[in-house]
Amino acid sequence: MNDYLPFMTLAIEAGKKSTCEDERSHPKVGAVIVRDGKVLETAYRGELGNGDHAEYTLFEKKLNGSDVAGTALFTTLEPCTARNTKKPCSHWVVEKGIRQVFVGMLDPNPRIYNKGCAYLKANGVEVHYFPEKLREEIERDNFSFIKQFSANPRPNGKADFDYTNNDGIFTIGNGDYIFETKWSKASDFSIHVYNDMPSVKTVAIALGAESFSEIKDATIYDGSSRARTIKEGEIVVMRNANGYCAAVKVIDVKDSSRSDAHDQIIFEYSILTDKTVDFSRVQAETEI
């Protein structure tokens, strides 16, 4: 993998030059095409046209007509699977015969997360990922783009957000195991959680459980109420509309109307992606 680091770094540096076509937050994306260790071309989002994706710029504007079959693509964001007016970047990759794609960051939108990589793999493209240190740099460059989704699409992770924004909604997971969690102010050591969102069917307190591994059957807890009040250190179990279970442990709650400087909740969570109900062998990943 070390042999590929210069190309990954080059993609990151290209991505930093990305331009936005309007006032919304857009990703900073850089892309590099390499054949036999030689860079053929680089591109970044918006380089040659407002809103043009980096891969589109590479294939259609810089290397149009060139044979790029068998090459390696280094891109800081997984190629998209849907566009309004142009062909999705993942389709370009497959049609051009790209052999390998190295991805810096999966799409932070939980409804899109990993779909680009899944499409590439399903069509015979080798997919690899940038090392963690470089992924962290890409995430820093895209902080505002990531933050707008109020989400962590990974099946295990951590959330840290202001629950008075975005109607108190923070989305965890993706695809069939997506949970749109909703929260509101209770006190500076507790918070209300709801099953109001379409993706969440029930919420219940895992009474007596201090860790996820103590929850052997997530369905035994009372999920008959629309809302529950969760204290710091307590765990709420949720079931979504597709029958998947999630466990969420509240780590810290801050309330600006009481003793704190701002409103904030920090929680860690784990989703059982195999559609079981036993968390006894699970520990939450606290990396964001």
Image (spheres, grey):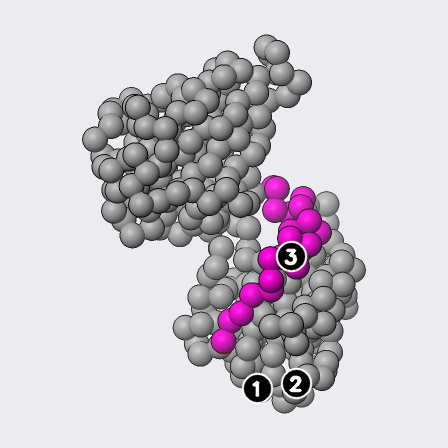
| Mark 1 neighbour density, 10 Å: few (under 14) some (14–19) many (20 or more) | some
Q: Which residue is mark 1?
A: 70
Q: Earlier in the sequence, mark 2 or mark 1?
A: 2
Q: Amino acid at mark 1?
A: Gly
Q: Cβ–Cβ below 8 Å for labels 2 and 1? A: yes
Q: Which mark is residue 183?
A: none
Which residue, given by chain and number where applicable, does mark 3 sit on? 133
Earlier sequence position, callout 1 versus callout 3: 1
Q: Is residue 144 above or below residue 235?
A: below
Disc 3 element = helix
Q: Secondary structure at mark 2?
A: strand
- Span of residues in magenta: 126-148
Quarter of the image that includes the N terminus: bottom right
Image point 36% across, 47% down: which residue? 177
The amino acid on which the numbered mark 3 sits, given as a three-letter code, is Lys
Q: Around disc 3, counting alpha carbons within 10 Å, would you say few (fewer than 14), some (14 to 19), or many (20 or more)? A: few
Residue under pointer 2: 35
Give the Cα separation between the discs numbered 2 and 1: 8 Å
| Residue that extends furthest to the top in the rendered view of this protein | 258
Magenta stretch: residue 59 in it?
Answer: no
Give residue 82's position: percent from left, percent from top. 52, 62
Which one is closest to the eye, mark 1 or mark 3?
Answer: 3
Front residue of this view, candidates 149 and 246? 246
User: Local crowd at mark 2 within 10 Å, few (<14), some, or many (≥20)?
Assistant: some
**Residue 137 in the image, given as x and y percentages of width and height:** 69, 54
Q: Secondary structure at mark 1?
A: loop
